[in-house]
Amino acid sequence: MATHILSSTARSGFGSRLHSVATCRLPLARSQLPHRISAIRVQSTTAQDTTAPEQYDVVIVGGGIAGSALACALASGKASSTQKIGLIEAFDLSSHAKWSPRPDQYSNRVSSLTPKSVAFLKKIGVWAELDPSRVAEMEGMQVWDGVSGARITFDAANATSTRSSFLHQVLSTSGLIGNPAADLEYRDSSFNDGSDIKSSPLAWMTENLHVQYGLQKQILGHQERGVKLDIFERTKVQGITVKQAYPTDADVSAPAGSTAADVSDWPVIELDNGKKLQARLLVGADGVNSPVRSFASIESLGWDYQQFGLVATLKVDHLTSTAPGNGVGIAWQRFLPTGPIALLPLNNGFASLVWSTTPKIAQDLKKLPASDFCVLVNAAFSASPAELEYLYKNIGPDGQPLVDFQQETEWRAGVQDMEAFRTAFGSSRTDAKPPKVIEVQENTRAPFPLRMRNSNSYVEDRVALVGDAAHTVHPLAGQGLNQGLADVECLARVIEQGLLSGSDIGNIHSLTPYSSERFLPNLAMLGTVDKLSKLYNTDLSPIVWARSLGLTAVDSMGPIKTEIMRFAMGLEDAPHSNRS
Amino acid sequence: MLSRTLAQSSTKPLFLAPRMTQCATLFSFRSPLQPPTERLYEGHVPISPFQRTLLAVGSAFAALHNPHRGDMIAALGESTGGIFLRRIRDQMLKDPEGRRILRERPKITSESMQLDKLRQLPDGIFGREYVRFLDDQQVSPDTREPVHFVDDEELAYVMQRYRETHDFYHTLTGLPVTVDAEIGLKWFEMVQTGLPMTVLSSFFGPLRLSSQERERLFNIYVPWALENGSNAKSLMSVRWEDWMERSVEEVQRELCVKPCPQV
Ligand SMILES: Cc1cc2nc3c(=O)[nH]c(=O)nc-3n(C[C@H](O)[C@H](O)[C@H](O)COP(=O)(O)OP(=O)(O)OC[C@H]3O[C@@H](n4cnc5c(N)ncnc54)[C@H](O)[C@@H]3O)c2cc1C
């Protein structure tokens, strides 16, 4: 299997000046791939290059949340904490530990963490580091169709109304769900603070920076107590190579428990500060354009949505919401033909916006004066798509509105309210309204390109991928980071078990359980989210009608709704193959 | 206008029974025999889905049988037009002139149009040709059938406006009021708006034509309608009242409508 990661150049390179160090294969230049992965520089090291690489058991490339969480998880495992671990990050990591935000300001990158993710963060000691005043509990969700008005509502009671759900029972009797023990494990450990699962919120909202803060604090703690965890920050991985090519295509993977001397197939990671690391196991936690994935020649298929996700930190007026409890702790999401817009609850009257829309509109929204931007966000949660189209069209090239947004939207809101008030059709009359946005925090509007990617495999010999490096998903269900944390939890567990059973943790056979446990659930989530995004990205009448019928039906069917909730909360894994 | 309608109808019970508010979802399981709303505007007749279907089918046959039953053609359009009216309204909302119409809700009457003043305009000017058409046909803007069956106040206005502006189309296109030319005009509207009434009558209509009329319809009017219906600016977003003093050619040019070849 080791030959998989070696290029044909390398194999034919015997006798050439490449004989001692084989370069890695050029990253995926195959033209049929929809997206080329940005190439890392391929190092053709010559024989006079003498710096010996430092050996590590695990090298993690990428200190995003997934990579840092893996470092933390390994450092807190009984066996894995005895390993020598390296974590490489292109940007700053240590400054996260000194994060001291102002109470009246929130970062624009916020994620929803599912109960499963929170359980994991508790297990690795990160949750306790967080400041509860900056973690908001999401108690309910209102999701509706901007074209037809069909709506579905969720609250924590839905999700926990049946402890072992219908789907779970069917799947477990048919043997499709393996590992119920692991299922229970996180359930039990997550609520060891005595709170019953029944009172659990749907999710917890907090800033990505806040999670990073907790992670880096823990990492520092582990370092202090002597765990060999080396951080290489503000340095980029420049090239990844394998020392020696095997002349044969046969499976020559090293036997479990191979001696330390047998490092010939361990990848060498070269940093742009000249440092070289050699890893028994190389983990790619390096995001959507993963250099590690390119090195391992793992294909990643998918597409770019013609959408950007515009994020922003908002201030809302809860008194304007008609939801129970003034809509505090409720997430609002409306599907517009241009993409979904979501208002996610933070504490103290703050909220986080994720507005998926066309690249052009996203750019225009960014330039719009703050007050007009707020008007438009409010309209996006209430006005008809036709009305919104008119408003988008009236953002001038300099970002100034060409018409009076306030006046135009007030007029339409008046007409709409009257219509809703007088007609039995049209559900808006009884539907709860989200709180009005009154302010947007300065410099928080930022657009991100939205993509969908899935790697053909999460493991290769000596390589594993986690987080966005393995899979990237549309943010409409707020699952990307949660999937990444589930990967990390699983990989750390697989490594721990491998170490306890004395196997070579970089060997593909030791890594396969990770891949088989995570691949299908991630794929199921990607597929579901992608289909949802496509289903709602139209205003074609028959489709709107069918999806509204579906949504309305699901909304009135308790058990199915429970299923969806549990899946989204990470309480229910999609069917995955049994681990051997 | 808005407030007037509100005031008028507020004397009637506006609030719906609680039973109705409960099933205010998109797909409510209410009896199809029950009208869904209270009276929404002057002249509004709330009808049940069942009645609506009957009305649509019945008026289609009545209109077919006697194309001069204007009330039946009108009823047909109203009873089937819900989503299509919405579509026209949305088209209007995206257009500045269309929005102004929706906001101000102008009415076309002999008074508002000041027909006598239009008669003084020189030949070839839109307003002059428009009155000439009215005079030739011996009709007046005031003889339009009011809207009865549309369950939404704003959409009822859109329907009303659609009817009120029909005569301008004749002036614009130069189409006569013969049955085949009317059907040709319906094809034009179908392409422009997708109103089911026009869809229905463009398919039903030809059945009652002589072979000569039929030939004219399919060789001249329909090709013209298909081309111009898709090229032209959305005519429902035209504030005709403001265009009266321009020449017919200018109006045609600006709205991207070629006059129909005359026979
Ligand atoms: C608008 C938006 C909203 C979202 N909302 C949610 C949500 O509500 N809930 C949720 O669960 N998820 C959400 N997500 C998804 C979530 O943000 C991502 O899934 C998550 O941040 C991915 O984390 P990661 O650690 O896998 O990758 P990243 O955060 O991309 O980390 C990769 C790291 O690798 C480093 N790196 C890359 N290349 C190199 C190199 N050559 N050398 C050294 N270092 C390198 C990078 O600097 C980076 O720090 C959202 C995403 C978007 C775009």
Image (cartoon, helix red, strand yellow):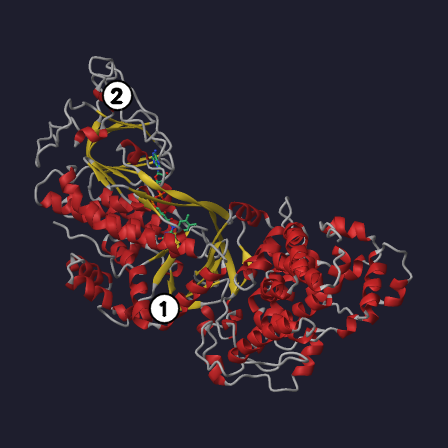
Amino acid type, label 2: Thr
Closer mark to the observer between disc 2 and disc 1: 1
Residue at position x 51%, y 79% in the image? B50
Q: Confirm whether residue B152 shows in the render.
A: no
Q: Secondary structure at mark 2?
A: helix
Give how far across and how far down residue B29 sits, in percent: 43, 78
Callout 1: 10 Å neighbours few (<14), some, many (20+)?
A: some
Quarter of the view holding residue A471: top left
Callout 2: 10 Å neighbours few (<14), some, many (20+)?
A: some
Residue at the spot of label 1: A554
Q: Measured along the vertical axis of the image, is residue A58 above or below residue B18?
A: above
Which image quarter holds the N terminus of chain A?
top left
The residue lying toward the viewer, choosing from A471 and A233, is A471
Query: Is residue A120 found left or right of B187 in the rendered image?
Result: left
Give how far across and how far down residue A481 sits, in percent: 34, 50
Give how far across and how far down residue A224 sits, in percent: 23, 43
Q: Chain of mark 2?
A: A
**Which mark identifies residue A9?**
2
The residue lying toward the viewer, choosing from B51 and A118, is B51
**Which mark identifies residue B245?**
none
* Picture mark count: 2
The residue lying toward the viewer, choosing from B52 and A442, is B52
Q: Measured along the vertical axis of the image, is residue B48 above or below residue A294?
A: below
Query: Is residue A217 found left or right of A429 in the rendered image?
Result: left
Quarter of the view holding residue B151: bottom right
Residue at position x 91%, y 61% in the image? B120
Query: Is residue B70 found left or right of A300 in the rendered image?
Result: right
Amino acid type, label 1: Val
